[in-house]
Amino acid sequence: MRTAYNQFKQHISYVRDLHSIYTAISQQITGAIDLSDILRAELVFAVSAFDFYIHEVVKTGLIEIYLNTRTATDQSKKFQVSLESLMVALKSNPMDVLWLEKEIKDRLGWRSFQSSENVNEALKYIIDNKIWKQISDKIGSAPLYIKEKLDFIIDRRNKIVHEADIDPSYYGARWPIDETLTNEAINFIEQIVKAIDEIIK
């Protein structure tokens, strides 16, 4: 699990580097030049890092369950594998997990684990207890507030990625974005990941 968390921190450091570029450029030019797309990119990359982290901890957790180093959950017991993978597994060393890693990627790799609902569904593979209650205890905010705030961030990411961040109320205008919104979103995602990391250790 440490590998997934360290990868996440590295990805977020790339986002912070991007913000340093935004800060440096904004101090050298006039406000007439719009740099807001750098902020949009930061938000998109932060959510991408979060999504990748969830995929990685689920994959690692399922492998640990298979190796009997993590307690199985109700959801993990329902994880399906193909007959092809089963045949490979039966012919392999019991400690060989490459077939399982491939199966997990095939089954879950295309899924988006970003929204609170999808994150909850994903983490059920490795945690039986209510995940948002546990995250709430770590962060110190109500579960509903945490889920709604995450979903707001994901909704904004989706507007940027899928709708060019266009505000349909004003033809051609885009939804406003600033450093405060971006930094708060990135910091919040970091908080959630840190809490998850502490819970699943």
Image (cartoon, rainbow, N blue to C red):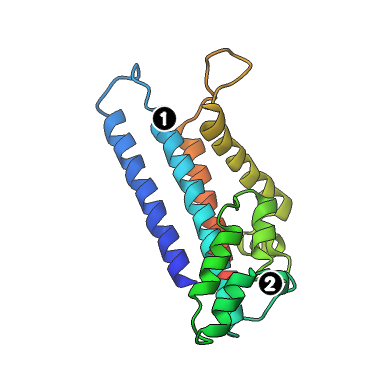
Q: From the viewer's perspective, tell me whether residue 190 is left or right of residue 86.
A: left
- Judging by the rendered image, the residue that carries numbered circle 2 is 76
Q: Residue at x 57, y 12 (%)?
A: 171
Give the amino acid type for the residue marked by disc 2 in the picture: Ser
Image location of residue 29, percent across then percent down = 27, 23
Callout 2 secondary element? helix
Choose mark 2 or mark 1, whichever is in front.
2
Q: Which mark is residue 48?
A: none
- Judging by the rendered image, the residue that carries numbered circle 1 is 37
Image location of residue 199, percent across then percent down = 60, 70
Nearer to me, 3 or 67: 67
Q: How many numbered marks are there?
A: 2
Callout 1 secondary element? helix
Q: Residue at x 59, y 71 (%)?
A: 84
Nearer to me, 33 or 80: 80
Q: Residue at x 67, y 70 (%)?
A: 127
Q: From the viewer's perspective, tell me whether residue 143 is left or right of residue 173.
A: right
Can residue 201 be seen here? no
Say which quarter of the image contains residue 8: bottom left
Q: Disc 2 versus disc 1: distance between alpha carbons? A: 40 Å
Furthest residue in direction left, as rendered: 28
Give the amino acid type for the residue marked by disc 1 in the picture: Asp
Say which quarter of the image contains residue 81: bottom right
